């Protein structure tokens, strides 16, 4: 009986781990911002996009308890994303998601594998 229970636990625990969610959440002033890759893992040579979400911070909640809701629309012309690789950088324009206010994309085709920083 103990062997069956142990085997059951060993089969269930890995399924609870799930897939890592690589988006980063932070606050800027009174706004919650979230940034991450549209398609993960990122593959060089394939078009991908940086996803950018902006919504108001909820008063009284810790940042880790905040969720994206009531997104801020109309930031296409005022917010840009700068993608940095080593000593090179490129400024990417934002394209709004037409179905979700406050969700934006900055499309890019990475040709070199490595560590990229988005500002």
Image (spheres, rainbow, N blue to C red):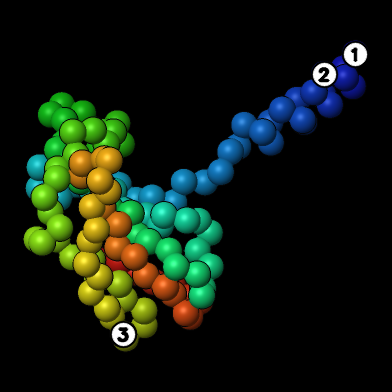
Give the image location of residue 100, x and y in percent. 26, 40
Describe residue 117's horizontal placement relative to residue 41 as left or right: left
Give the image location of residue 31, x and y in percent. 14, 44
- Real-space CA distance between mark 1 and mark 2, rounded to the nearest whole angstrom: 6 Å
- The quadrant in which residue 18 appears is top right
Callout 3: few (<14), some (14-19), or many (20+) C-alpha neighbours within 10 Å? Answer: few
Closer to the chain start, of discs 3 and 1, is: 1
Identify the residue position indicated by label 2 in the image: 5
| Quarter placement of the C terminus | bottom left
Query: Can you tell which mark lies on residue 88?
Result: 3
Label 1–label 2 contact, CB within 8 A: yes
Give the image location of residue 70, x and y in percent. 18, 33
Give the image location of residue 37, x and y in percent. 41, 57
Identify the residue position indicated by label 1 in the image: 1
Q: Which residue does the image show at 50% across and 63% down from the upper left?
A: 42
- The quadrant in which residue 58 appears is top left
| Quarter placement of the N terminus | top right
């Amino acid at each position: 009986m103990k062997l069956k229970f142990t085997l059951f636990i060993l089969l269930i625990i890995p399924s609870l781990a799930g897939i890592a969610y690589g988006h980063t959440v932070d606050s800027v002033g009174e706004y919650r911002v979230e940034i991450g890759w549209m398609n993960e893992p990122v593959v060089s040579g394939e078009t991908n996009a940086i996803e950018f979400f902006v919504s108001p911070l909820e008063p009284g909640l810790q940042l880790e308890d905040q969720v994206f809701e009531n997104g801020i629309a109309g930031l296409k012309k005022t917010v840009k994303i700068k993608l940095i690789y080593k000593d090179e950088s490129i400024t990417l324009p934002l394209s709004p998601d037409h179905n979700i206010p406050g969700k934006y994309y900055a499309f890019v085709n990475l040709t070199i594998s490595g560590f990229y920083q988005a500002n």
